[in-house]
Amino acid sequence: MNLTKILAGLLVGLAIVLAGLAWLLGSQPARPVAQPSPAASAQPAPDPVPQHAVVVVAQAIAAGQRIGSEDVKLAQLPAPVPGSFAATDDVLGRTTLMALTPGTPLFEQQLLSGLALQLEPGQRALAIAIREQMAAGHHVRPGDFVDVYFTLDGKSDQAPVDAQTRLLLARSRVLAYGSGSVERPPMPAVQRQAQQDKESAGSSLRRASAADQTGQRPENVQSAVLAVPLDDVERLTLAEKFGQLTLALRNPDDLSVPDPKLFAALPSALQPVAGRLRKDQALEGADRAFAGLRMQDLATGADAKNIRKPAAQPMTAFAPAMRPPPQRAPRERTVELHNGAAVQMVNY
């Protein structure tokens, strides 16, 4: 009984102590929340990693294929890729030089370049040998337009026709002349002189510069490249082989050309299979080029009246035996008739 009273008194005392502590804590003022200092808020946040736009291949592209909008896409990479493209518009419409795999960056050396891009559809680039007399005294430059004249002297047995000169190709564009081209024009004289002065410090550089200037001199030009329609490639090739070509400079604003409808079409060397073409249909484009052209038809227009007869062939040793013996006139004989003292000559 006494123990119970003692425990009850202890609990009552502990409750009074706890109540007092609670009253003391509730009567104290609330502490203010700590605010960040202005110096701490002024510190900049860490910079994000810079991104670089790079054109990459979106799907497999075969060699020689023209690039479309679905073939490439723009990717963001953390580091720049030297030699790549930063915009898809820079590669649309270009032609690939090699097969490309998806996900790889696209580079300039993977795309087609050169004189082939200077040709219009249906044209071919053809090189011809050049001499000063046939190229306006070497005043022809890349990008000029020229008329190509064809001359036959009539002395070749492979083209037995009279001597003639006529216009072969009208308004042909010069893509390259010597070492210069429409993509890499010849260096102007002032620029060459400045380069020579800059490189005059070393003798080896001076020799290299002199060699480059020698290659660019007009008198060293040996060939010219013309843009030729596909239908005229055979004509120009045959004319260069069997005749002489002359390049005549013309004003680029002069657009006059001959009317092909005024002249009969030249026959082809190969004839199509009977029944494959309609009567009113003619060979065109690559089919006409594949059929080819004979030099005789180019020189005469397939007109038999203009063909010169070939020289007589020497007689062989077996020729007389194959010919019938010549007919000889009958030989007359004479007889003397004596009648006494009279003598008479009788022919029979």
Image: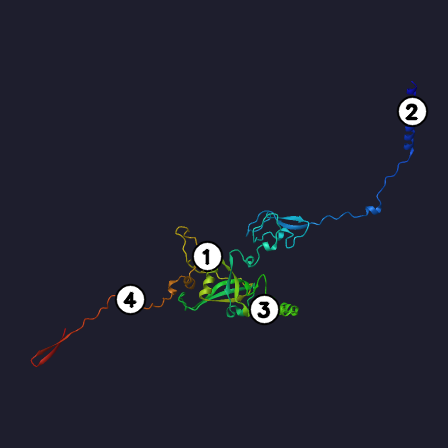
Q: Which mark is residue 224?
A: none
**Which of the two discs, 2 and 1, labels the residue nearer the N terminus?**
2
**Which of the two discs, 2 and 4, labels the residue nearer the N terminus?**
2
> Of tags 2 and 4, which is closer to the observer?
2
Front-lying residue, 181 or 57:
57
Residue lying at the far bottom in this picture: please name it.
Answer: 341
**Which of the two discs, 4 and 1, labels the residue nearer the N terminus?**
1
Q: Which mark is residue 10?
A: 2
- Identified at 91% across, 20% down, the residue is 3
User: Residue 317 appears in which quarter of the rendering?
Assistant: bottom left
Left or right: 16 with respect to 186?
Answer: right
Mark 3 residue type: Ala
Mark 2 residue type: Leu
Question: How many residues crowd mark 1 within 10 Å: few (<14), some (14–19), many (20+)?
Answer: some
SS of the residue under disc 2: helix
Mark 4 residue type: Ala
**Which of the two discs, 2 and 3, labels the residue nearer the N terminus?**
2
Whether 348 is drawn above or below 112: the answer is below
- Identified at 46% across, 59% down, the residue is 261
Image quadrant occupied by the N terminus? top right
User: Residue 153 appears in which quarter of the rendering?
Assistant: bottom left
Disc 1/disc 3 C-alpha distance (Å): 41 Å
Total tally of numbered discs in the picture: 4
Counting from the top left corner in percent of width and height, residue 60 is at 57, 47
Front-lying residue, 24 or 32:
24
Q: Which mark is residue 211?
A: 3
Disc 4/disc 3 C-alpha distance (Å): 64 Å
Counting from the top left corner in percent of width and height, residue 217 is at 57, 69
Q: Which mark is residue 319?
A: 4
**Which of the two discs, 1 and 3, labels the residue nearer the N terminus?**
3
Question: How many residues crowd mark 2 within 10 Å: few (<14), some (14–19), many (20+)?
Answer: few
